[in-house]
Image: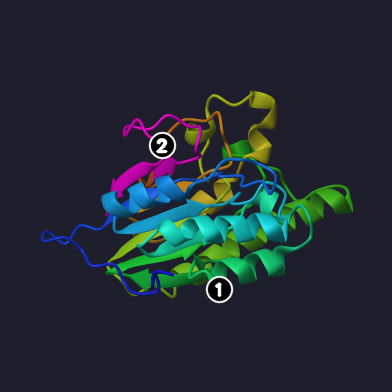
Amino acid sequence: MPDRTKSAKPGGNGVIKIAAIGDLHVQEDAQTSYRDLFGEMSREADILVLPGDLTNLGKPREAELLAEDLRACSIPVVAVLGNHDYESGCVEQVSGTLRQAGVHLLDGQAVELGDVGFVGVKGFVGGFGPRMLGSFGEPAIKAMVAESVNEAMRLENAMRQVRARRTLVVLHYAPVPETVAGEPLEIFPFLGSSRLAETIDRFKVSAVVHGHAHRGSYQGQTPGGAKVYNVAMHVAKPTGRPYALLEI
């Protein structure tokens, strides 16, 4: 197995190339393999980022299949989990398998690779702008808002750990509405939360990547100007490939 725990080495101009792809949805009974794609991205980039929904139903075997395909990846891998990875109640097993495979799996933490700080949380729902869901009414609504606020707080705590001069934020849920444009308007509140963008804009951030919105749009930005990229596998990207290539 390649030693992907080593830091990436920047190119001659100090640029780190990031390959990013979300929503792989690895299934235990599917014939799809990402081995060739991981090998290709290893040749194109210095670091691979996977923003959630790594598995389809959060089953341990799905995580094992992903780990097997990642043997073809020779560069560091940074990831967060998505909502699908929680479906079967096996988060600890899924997480353990991926960490054993050398993945930097972030859940409110930061890791520095090649002079870039990677900060990751899953994020949560809640809606955007003045129409964000407020903590009012039934306990179930208040619990949902509390979870959204908690994810934003965990992101802020992780951001404060970074000492690198460049930072990439890795999320599953979207921090802005621009990158979910194309999805039905009725489900916008379930695709992300502006609370994440509010946190991001308190810091100097080079870029943000997320997934989750399969029919969304590739690029947007936070109110503070941080670039945001929806790198879900099915979203069209400038590369013409399922993955995005970013220079940090």
- Looking at the image, which residue is at 30% across and 47% down? 246
Residue corresponding to mark 2: 220
Q: Nearer the viewer, residue 109 or 91?
A: 91
Whether residue 107 is visible: no
Numbered label attached to residue 100:
1
Q: Amino acid at mark 1?
A: Gln
- Looking at the image, which residue is at 46% across and 50% down? 35
- Residue 225 falls in which quadrant of the image? top left
Name the chief secondary structure element in magenta.
Answer: loop
Image position, residue 7 (x, y; %): 31, 72
Q: Describe residue 101's horizontal placement relative to residue 131 as left or right.
A: left
Secondary structure state at the residue bearing disc 1: helix
Q: Which span of residues is magenta-colored?
A: 228-248
Q: Is residue 168 above or below residue 192?
A: below
- Looking at the image, which residue is at 27% across and 69% down? 115
- How many numbered discs sit on the rendered protein? 2
Q: Describe residue 248's horizontal placement relative to residue 135 as left or right.
A: left
Q: Are circles 2 and 1 on residues that touch, CB within 8 Å?
A: no
Check disc 2: other Cα within 10 Å, few if <14, some if 14-19, many if 20+.
many
Image position, residue 46 (x, y; %): 29, 59
Image position, residue 131 (x, y; %): 64, 36
Q: Is residue 39 above or below residue 183?
A: below
Separation of disc 2 and disc 1 at Cα? Answer: 34 Å
Nearer to us of marks 2 and 1 is 1
- Looking at the image, which residue is at 59% across and 39% down? 128
* Visual colour scheme: rainbow
Assess whether residue 164 is covered by the magenta stretch. no
Q: Amino acid at mark 2?
A: Gly
Q: Nearer the viewer, residue 57 or 136?
A: 57
Which quarter of the image is occupied by the N terminus?
A: bottom left
